[in-house]
Amino acid sequence: MKNPQRELLQLIEKHIKIDGTHETKIDHLSIIRASTLTEPLHSIVEPSVCFIVQGAKIVMLGEEIFRYNSSQYLITSVHLPISGKITDASKDNPYYCIRLGFTTEQILEAVTNQKEGDSFPPKRAMLVNKTTPDMTDALSRLLKLLDSPKDISVLAPLYQKEILYRILQTEDGYQMKQYAILGSHSQSIKEVVQVINHNYAKGLRIEELAKSANMSVSSFHHYFKLITGMSPLQFQKVIRLQEARRLLLSEGLEAAEAAFQVGYESPSQFSREYSKLFGLPPKSDVRQLQINLSNRRPANVESN
């Protein structure tokens, strides 16, 4: 392990002692630790960049698989329904990941050389790239602020801006820029993704969504799938099923009631599509999740 990365790992180990997702006193910054391999975890990931410091992980978006390890980071530019699985972790060498969320405004602030009218072909809203020494250095300075809380409000935004700046200067950095540029295809699809995420239980009117994106229906379908890896209807279905799973597990709803709440009219269709995504019918899946949770050591979220 190179010295900068070793220093970063030591900073994490100083503050994070148990497994779990740990929010920090620095806005938008969290650290994930896992000492065991995991089964696929379904979730909706927000715009963020995740730097693996130790270990490895795979993320599945639709039918596409992204693999990354301690020399790489993963960027997600819009809210996406994914499945993630840690593939390299142990008690002696836990998986550590630094997750830094970002907003459109932060991207715009970090863009210093974007010329008006610059445009690039849209690509997938998720990508894996190599972590550079400059990024590792900025991450170390950011984590060191956990030992000097009085400096966080002034210095953390500067270091976060530097990290985004370093990413934007890479060969694939334009992909992030496009999601912040008003009028770009990427930005238009990002707005539609937000609409679907907030209205997943309602029926989709593709013509209206295409019109709001200022695209023809065929162009809208093309760019939506290009960016998210799914058609609009597939995207909505995954969002619905993930929310239904949450309702079944955390609120104890019956399958038919959860199906209705997320927009399904047919319980049998809901059960079929749920089984296809999660591998088990609703009742069996929830029972297995409860067993897994009861066998897992609780992970308290720390704020340091």
Image: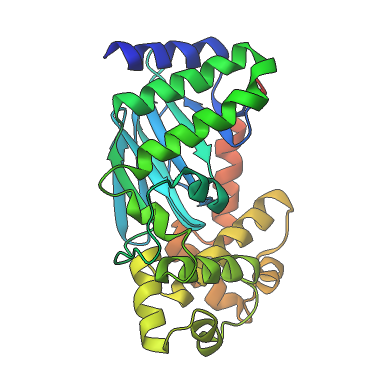
- Is residue 137 depicted above or below 81 in this figure? above
Residue 178, located in which quarter of the rendered image?
bottom left
Q: How does the figure colour the protein chain or chains?
A: rainbow
Residue at horizontal 34%, vertical 54%? 174
- Residue 172 x %, y %: 29, 49
Please determine whether, in this image, residue 246 is positioned above or below residue 143: below
The quarter of the displayed image where residue 39 is located: top left
At which x and y percent is residue 12? 49, 17
Q: In this view of the protein, which residue sits in the foreground, 43 or 28?
A: 28
On screen, residue 265 above or below 190: below
Left or right side of 203 for 220: left
Classify the position of the N terminus by image quarter: top left
Is residue 300 at least partly visible in the picture? no
Q: Position of residue 74 (x, y in %)?
A: 37, 42
When asked about the image quadrant of residue 125, the answer is: bottom left
| Residue drawn at x 31%, y 62% as measured from the top left | 123
On the image, the x and y values in percent for residue 245 come to 60, 57
Left or right: residue 64 versus residue 206 is left
| Residue 41 as seen in the image, left or right of residue 37 | right
Marker count (numbered): 0
- Give the position of the C terminus as an image quadrant: top right
Depth order, front residue of 93/179: 179
Is any part of residue 232 visible from this angle?
A: yes
In the picture, measured across the screen, residue 224 lies left or right of residue 240, that is: left
